[in-house]
Amino acid sequence: MKKMLGGKVWAAVIVALMATLLVWMGVLMGKYFFKSELTLDLSMMLEGEYSADGGEWKPIQPDQSIQEHFHHIVFRGKPLEETYTYSYLTIYSKNVWYSLKVGDEVWISYEYTEPPAEIIDLSPSETCPNTPGYWISTLDMSYWPEEAMNGTVPITLEIDYPYAFDAKFSDCFTISLGLENAIYMTFFFESLPWVLLFSLVCFFGIFFFPLCGFILGKVNFKYLTFGALCFFWGLYMIISNISDFLNMWVLDPVVCMMIVRLTSYLLMAAILLYFKSHMTLLVSRIIGNITLSLFFISIITVLILQQYAAIDLTATMPYVFGVIAVCAAVMVVLLCMEIKRNRHALIFLVSWSPLVVTLVLDILDRYLFLSEERFFNYGLMIIMVYQIIRIIFDLRRQYKEAIRYQQVQKELYEAKVGIMVSQIQPHFMYNALTSIAMMCQIDPDTAQEATITFAKYLRGNMDSLKQKKPIPFTQELEHLKKYLYIEKLRFADLLQIEYDIQATDFVLPQLSIQPLVENAVKHGVGMAENGGTVTIATRETDSSFEIIITDDGVGFDTAAPLKQDGRSHVGMENTRQRVKELCGGEIRVESTIGQGTTATIILPKEGQPHENTVSG
């Protein structure tokens, strides 16, 4: 069932991926064939000059982005010749006020100050009037004054960035010339392909990774946090690509700004949470939880300040980024503490190094103007693609392990049945009942105790069929003692049992010691003329727990071919397999003819669960 369901999930994912990629490629092809004829994107619609923050005047190059950092920038000149061939001019502004003057008359205004009634008024948000937000202005060129179009009267455009820190002009202000409804065509050809692609990423985050955890039969916190990371990364990339167009659907420009800011903060929260999911040390998890709590408190605080119009999310952005930097540094330090114990922590940290490199490039870009692109987005994309591939391969590996685990459980059940049957075969029951019957006349009290012990032993064998997980050694030892008690009734003084138990705090597969002890009793001591001693010992080393079963019986040649007795060797091989599959352990057998045999079960400490969590 699990295999069938897993196959259907993979098939659905592949179909969704192919469909999205086909649509994405189709829209991109349409962009090159059609979109260029409908719109023209410019940094400025004027030919002339500009001055940033009272500096020197520089020539306007409309076809190149303006990388100036500014608080107040002024453009002056005449309209480009291209403006005559298009009927609409669209201004995309982010976090800036601006006004357009024809001569001395203000023609278009998006400002906090109240403009005269006769001027076209593009009023800011009423909920937070000091915040420009994200705004789109679409202007019909046919209504422009004729003196502005023919260049007889100079046009002046003034833009203000009202925050304490400066901003890059190309990030705040862009212009597009186009025909009717060109803004929708621009969105369709430029943003929609990325929206479709990253919607698939969101799908992966919401459904695929949590569903895979469910198919594997457990809730994996790492997969859940990575699913959240995928979803918020996809959402962040969608909002980043449609941020210019948000005001088409969300009329309040401040709400548009809040959507963009909150999306980036939620992405940072998902990254921090994903980092925390890789921590295994208790102290790391505690400090990680405290760090996440402080981060969320900071986000809630700035939201409250925004809600009461005290200070908006853009103004608090440097402080929030400072908190993010501190939280990220703490998470990295905590993961560095994990490296000595968990080598996967080092691989995980190295995989995020491209993000650090791109952040450094963005910082340098602020002063050196390396590119008009945001390197951070590319670094994040590289990391996320790698993380998705790594998680998918990890899921594939765990899926195979889950299928293998089902096979092991089936084999385990068959092995337990074989062991149980071997112990309740007629000759074993006959010998045990005959010994008890003889004691009924000699020592009735002992016979009663033997009967109860024999019943408990049979019940323990039957109960073992229900147990799938490893059990505490102490539980296995108690069952073993019942078996040896019954065997001693049969062999009497020919069988001596000794215990040297130095370690008990570990788990092992049920009925894994008994086949080794059975071999020691029947094929070792039981074959010796004068009987012998079977010793069960345990000890703890630096890396493992060991159970040693020793007998001083007849021994055997370990290099000789195994005798096909139809039962004992099959039981031994089943025991080896269960110890390996369930605990990662091994069984070693050493024997010398005439001196005896030693069988050792070695159980690595790595992966040993606490006794209380498995005894259930």
Image (tube, grey):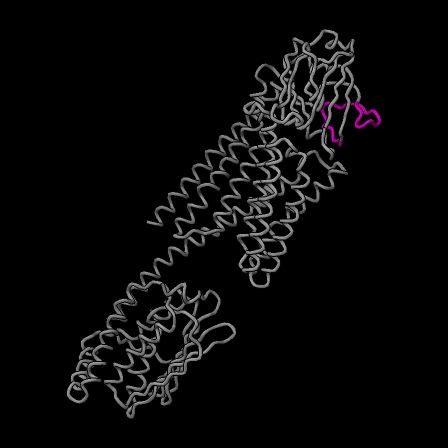
| Quadrant that contains the C terminus | bottom left
Q: Which residue lies most toward the bottom here?
A: 530
Write the residue at 77% across / 22% down.
74
Q: Is residue 318 magenta?
A: no
Could you say where residue 335 lies in the image, as x and y percent from the top left?
A: 59, 56
Could you say where residue 166 lies in the image, as x and y percent from the top left?
A: 74, 33
Residue 404: image quadrant is bottom left
Q: Which residue lies most toward the top here?
A: 146
Could you say where residue 18 lies in the image, as x and y percent from the top left?
A: 46, 36
**Would you say residue 71 is visible in this rendering?**
yes
Is residue 181 toward the left or the right of residue 121 in the image? left
Question: Magenta segment, which residues?
Answer: 50-69
Above or below, comparing residue 424 to residue 312 in the picture: below
Above or below, comparing residue 359 to residue 39 in the picture: below
Residue 260: image quadrant is top right
Write the residue at 41% across / 63% down.
613
Q: Is residue 51 magenta?
A: yes
Task: Tell which of 142 and 228 is nearer to you.
Answer: 228
Above or below, comparing residue 23 to residue 102 in the picture: below
Could you say where residue 510 lies in the image, as x and y percent from the top left?
A: 34, 69
Number of marks in the rendered image = 0
Above or below, comparing residue 446 to residue 567 in the picture: below
Write the residue at 44% across / 41% down.
207
**Would you say residue 577 is visible in this rendering?**
no
